[in-house]
Image (cartoon, rainbow, N blue to C red):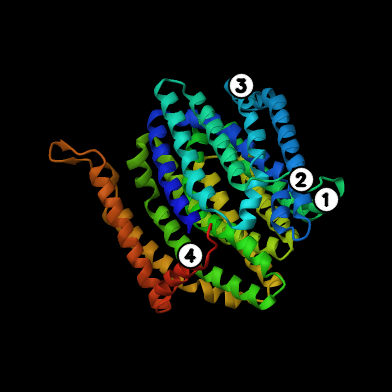
Amino acid sequence: MWGSIGWIVSMVLNLAVTIVTARLLAPEIFGLVAVVMVIIYGAQIFADSGLKAALVHEQERLDDAVATASIAVPAIGLAAAAALFAFAPLLADFYGREEVRLIAMVLSGVLFIQSLSIVPDALIQRRMDFKWRRGVVDPLSVIIYGAVVITLAVLGAEEWSLVAGQYALFTTITIGAIVIARPNVFAGKASIGMWRRMARYGRPLLGANILEVIDQQVEPVTLGRNVNATAVGLYNVGFRLALLPLSGITYIAAQVLFPALTRVGKDAKRFREALLEVVGLLPLFSIPACITLAGLGEPAVVTLFGERWREAGVVLQILVLWTLGLSISELSREIFKASGRTGMVARNAFLEASTLIALVGALWIFGQVGLVTVALSRLAVGIVAVTAAAQALVTVVDVTLRELLRQVRPAVVGGIVQWIALFGLAQIALDGFETWTYVGSVNLGPVIPLLMLGGLTAAGLAAFVVGAEATKRGVIRGAITSVRSAMGKAPTGA
């Protein structure tokens, strides 16, 4: 419950901050910082090294595991920060922009700050105690980030406003996680033996993490090298907006799903029942959210961000369809971790990364690199991801592909009906409504487009409900009842 409430508040705040900063800063500024931040995010995954998941999964010597990880994870984070600082000049040479060197050097410290939050966050996830972490710390971090970025942007700090904002964001999150979790690092004994024990569990996850690092670099590197920083900025904003349904619905569910399934992992029947329930439930929320953005992404971005961000809206409309596939992939990842089959995580990550590299590499070789072609390559990865995840679930859990398809059918049919309705209204009957700002000689600004967006969103959701209910009567009411029941049964802090 608190995770969902916290996400809703954080999403609204984050969207508001992004809209304001997009009005203040040019896409090129976002691109300069994005080419460095994508490395930061990738290095953060490497700093985890699978130890966070190992902490959540540990059943016997938790105190020793906490003591060991509290030394190992910050050490890796510090090493990653030093490496980024040292290689910053090479990064600047690669992109041909001297500003990148100094940005990378200054931002390197973020890696160490963020690494300090990994152990506390693992303990919070293990306890499923998200009340303060998701309900307070996350929204507060966005508020502080926004205050810093907007203030400095107004003062003319340009890219440095975004750099300062990252420090404000991660410092707030880290301090908040430590205060909430209060990890007792001295209760256990750190040892090489415990580190090896955790590493054995996390090694396949580390392999998957390394592949994710590579995966995250492909698009900004390709666009930054072959196009320009503006293209990176446009793509980055479209990418972030496309992830909203995933972060808001799937990630929160996964945070609860992994520790919950870990507890019933030895009960095959309960594990199977929980899997089928989640597979049927989550698409009823993620699919309509994604289809709404796919149908209204471009006019929504133009209305909220301004005309110079229109291409980011096109990227959003393509990438949000990739998000649909990624939502299934991310859920399967938590299921594999809970069942101890972490090798499946690495296998699927390899398939996704290799597919993206092959497709984008072909674009690079044949000189076809652009915002749309790169986004379409990512969409193809989503198709591979959902196919591989479904096949792997059939292998790991005692379910058939037909059972999985039966669970998602109402949501899929509802999504198709919703897409037809939105396409017919937004792309044919009301094409170009984002530019309807005048009533006679009076300029109402974005009022009319915003009203149109609200009406179209409502119409699309109504179409989804009709399609889903036509496929399986009572499915929407059942989903709402399941969510209410889950909230009622959740731990006090969840």
Q: Amino acid at mark 2?
A: Ala
Q: Name which of mark 2 and mark 1 comes first in the sequence.
A: 2
Mark 2 touches mark 1? (CB < 8 Å): yes
Q: Position of residue 347 (x, y in %)?
A: 72, 58
Image mark for residue 194: 1
Label 4: which residue? 487
Counting residues from the start of the chain, the first of labels 4 and 2 encountered is 2
- Crowd around label 2: few <14 · some 14–19 · many ≥20 (10 Å): many
Q: List the residue tagged with mark 3.
A: 102
What is the distance, in whole Å, between disc 3 and disc 2 at their CAs? 35 Å
Marker disc for residue 67: 2
At label 3, which amino acid type do we have?
A: Leu
- Say which amino acid is labelled 4: Met
Within-10-Å neighbours for mark 1: few <14, some 14–19, many 20+: some
Residue 127 in the image, given as x and y percentages of width and height? 62, 57
Q: Quadrant of residue 74?
A: top right
